[in-house]
Amino acid sequence: MTSGIRPPQATTLERPALEDAREAIADGINRGAMITVFGRCSVDYDGRASSRLEAGDRHLMLKPDGAVLVHTDEGQQPVNWQPPGCDHAVRCEDGALVIESLRSSPDEQLLVSFEEVLQVSTFAGSDPTELSVVGTEEDLRRRILEEPTLLEAGFTPLATERDTPAGAVDIYGEDSAGRSVVVELKRRRVGPDAVSQLRRYVDALERDLHADASVRGILVAPSVTDRADRLLARHGLEFVALEPTA
Amino acid sequence: MTSGIRPPQATTLERPALEDAREAIADGINRGAMITVFGRCSVDYDGRASSRLEAGDRHLMLKPDGAVLVHTDEGQQPVNWQPPGCDHAVRCEDGALVIESLRSSPDEQLLVSFEEVLQVSTFAGSDPTELSVVGTEEDLRRRILEEPTLLEAGFTPLATERDTPAGAVDIYGEDSAGRSVVVELKRRRVGPDAVSQLRRYVDALERDLHADASVRGILVAPSVTDRADRLLARHGLEFVALEPTA
DNA sequence: CCGTTGATCTCGTAG
DNA sequence: CTACGAGGTCAACGG
């Protein structure tokens, strides 16, 4: 809600006629408001996949950035949605209030058809602040760069995001014996996928250096699963237990 | 909204005093309603990570299954949230309306503190239907099982979800020459991670059969990236272009 | 409960 | 735009 200067505002229609609901929604879209609709609707999606949801009571949210969310009373995730960047349209059709959300590349369409509307609301306000999160992989990286001995005595970081033919490695450096070290960081307990990822980087770097000198691969995470541990051993990779924050 | 029998219902308070808002929310929680609050709030989260969001105008949704969502007017994803299964509490404290959501394992806390409330709503209804989606990896699997020649002439599927020390492979079978084949399915264009995944399965199966006979690995997806293609070649893995739906 | 993987993943960032 | 990997990923399914 970077809109900003005007005071926050909320409008509400209770049990509006469909045509009144349509007008309120169309007006809200024009004003760049956030809009919610609660009522009985069916939902059709077609795009990267397709889905149909028969009639039921649900909560719809339209955001001014073009996002759409359809929520039931269960689950953290919306049952249907559309990402930001979509174009909204609203119309009355065959005794229903139809909200259409379109985008291209990929071509995707979401149709929400309300046969009954219990509430339409619009919201406008300002939200000047940014979310700051602590405990990310980035924090784990900083921790190691500030105190490389946390990884092992004698470790020297040389680069972050060093590029290899397989992608960028989190930390690249040398151990006390001068051997190249690839470090892969994970903020939480890891499974086999993280081991495969580290292995790709080690392989690629060995090939890149077309050296006979082998490259060490170290996975840094709070812990590993059994399978991941066995994979590490099988591929001669190492593990250091470390959390993103002290 | 499996609640069901009673007619759908929506209640609204506009610009309520904080204490009235608190009462409406507490009542909604008791009734198992879906609740929304719009107003100026700050948000603190602590659990798997931690975060703080300074005061701004946002939309909060409390679901009867214990989920919480805090939305700004931008983005598909909530800026803060709590998964289903949390316990909600609401109180007035130091001139603010505080909504607290707690869970254990992992210990996580979300605190939303409203200094101004523009609207409180509660919603109840019924949603008897299930979402059905077409175009998933499951559809791709069915397509191949019904017509194995789509993979290649002479392919015989023997099992799905066949277990290996590295995990379960999507389709396991034999080619016309009787060689073991591991098939990994992806519903959309794939990158290096999918190739690594397939490679893990092939490695594990070769070891599992402790056979000298090599195992073929086939990646099935609409398309691959350049890097993934090179990885496939390097590891002697194959690719078949196929979409989840005809 | 943990482990593993899919997802209309979303999101950011780099090229 | 595509590609690649992180994410408080979530959600489903299995052991």
Image (cartoon, coloured by chain):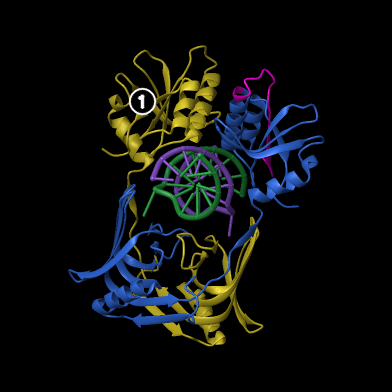
Chain colours: A yellow, B blue, C purple, D green
Q: Could one spot residue B97 in this view of the protein?
A: no
* Quadrant the C terminus of chain A occupies: top left
Residue at numbered disc 1: A157
Q: How many marks?
A: 1
Quadrant holding the N terminus of chain A: bottom left
Report if residue A4 is visible in the image: yes
Q: Nearer the viewer, residue B80 or B182?
A: B182
Residue A145's x, y, as percent?
Answer: 32, 30
Helix, strand or loop at label 1? It is: strand
Q: Does the stretch in magenta take in B211? A: yes
The residue stretch that appears in magenta: B207-224
Viewer-nearest residue: B203 or B81 = B203
Image point (50%, 24%), residue name:
A202
Locate residue A11, reporting x and y percent. 41, 81
Q: Is residue B118 left or right of residue D10?
A: left
Q: Position of residue C4 (x, y in %)?
A: 51, 38
Residue B212, x across and y down, in percent:
67, 17
The residue furthest right is: B153
Chain to which the residue tagged by mark 1 belongs: A
In the shown orientation, is residue B101 left or right of residue B129?
left
- Which picture quadrant has residue B183? top right
User: Could you say which quadrant of the image residue B96 lies in?
Assistant: bottom left
Residue B187 among magenta residues = no
